[in-house]
Image (tube, grey):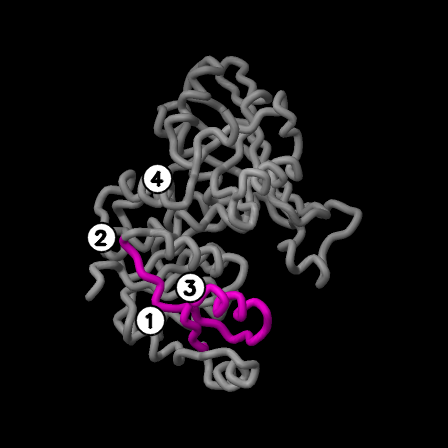
Amino acid sequence: MATGKVRVAVNGYGVIGKRIADAVVVQEDMELVGVIDVVSDWRIKVATEKRYPVFAATSDAQTAMRAAGINVAGTLEEVLGHVDVVADATPKKIAAANLEKYRAAGVKSIFQGGEKHSLTGHSFVAQANYETALGRETTRVVSCNTTSIVRTLGALKSAGLLKKARGVLVRRATDPWESDHSGVMNTVVPESHIPSHQGPDAQTVLPDLDVVTIALVASHTTSHLHAWTVELTRSATRQEILDAFSAAPRIAFLRMSEGIVALNTTLELMADLGRPRGDMWEVGLWEDNLAVSGNELFYNYQVYNQAIVVPETIDAIRALTGIEKDGMKSIAKTDAALGLVREFVC
């Protein structure tokens, strides 16, 4: 590494990939070598406006990109010869097929939660299992909802307070930019299986977690809402619970008393704070409706699905490449560079 930085490529410049690319750029120990995609429309043209080197995933894509006036730096195979790690944010099934390409090139790889745990044999949330990813060839950053589960239940577990947890997830119907395609309208649809996949997925990171999740799909696109009932290991005070959440990274408090009463108000707050794309990387946990009754805990939080996995992906880059051995130090570096906070407004 001539620059002394980890060289990163982002394969898939969509909802998650473009955010990962932006996050890589602001890290002092990383260099964005390029972004890779197959599209030749406005999405990839934004990357060229940002002066990100653009590579084509296929020869057909390269032809189409050049026909659209895009300056193509090369192909996927060519960029693999110049990077240490690829953050793969391509659609489901495509990502799995890419793994062998990365292996053949001797490049480390990070996949997103749409892929199965079996693809990499390792699932990642920085605060929970950073050390187990050190030096690995590949890992999978779990989905947005699973990330939030591990962050919050992991905080209670670390404090010695978690016995078992049961959660209801009200999921957004589709990503905002796809809301003109298809989706749920004027209804709420229960998922067909209990538990929903998020609970078992969290157990790929914390195997001894006693968790069951139930999911519903609602007719909105903004973000997800979680409602949790937790059995504690003992009776606890409300302050003890708040202290446990405060001690964990990437959890920030929301307060209805300050007018933050719904998913849309939080997103308005992020925009007013000048967050890139209005992103919320933290779990937004409502402090003032959190309730404790003996050894039972009840709370709600919001998951901004387009952004929450981005800091985890940055930490995964450090873990796989070994440029930072301490998970909490990596989290601190990532959070400082991106601007994560404990309190949105003071």
Task: Report x, y in % for residue 96.
Answer: 43, 68
Q: Label 2 near label 1: C-beta < 8 Å?
A: no
Determine whether the residue tagged by mark 1 lies in a helix, strand or loop.
helix
- The amino acid sitting under disc 3 is Asp
- The amino acid sitting under disc 1 is Tyr
- Judge left or right: residue 43 versus residue 141: right
Of labels 1 and 2, the one closer to you: 2
Cα gap from disc 2 to disc 3, whole angstroms: 20 Å
Range of magenta residues: 29-56
Which one is earlier in the sequence, the residue at label 4 or at label 1?
1
Residue 74 lies in quadrant: bottom left
Q: Label 1 near label 3: C-beta < 8 Å?
A: yes
Task: Report x, y in % for residue 79.
Answer: 34, 75
> Which residue does the numbered mark 4 point to in the structure image?
127
Q: Quadrant of the N terminus?
A: bottom left
> Going 39% across and 48% down the picture, which residue do you hit?
312
Dot 2 crowding, Cα within 10 Å, few <14, some 14–19, many 20+: some
- Judge left or right: residue 289 versus residue 129: right
Res. 199 visible in picture? no
Task: Report x, y in % for residue 141.
Answer: 41, 52
Which one is earlier in the sequence, the residue at label 3 or at label 1?
3
The residue closer to the viewer here, 185 or 39, is 39
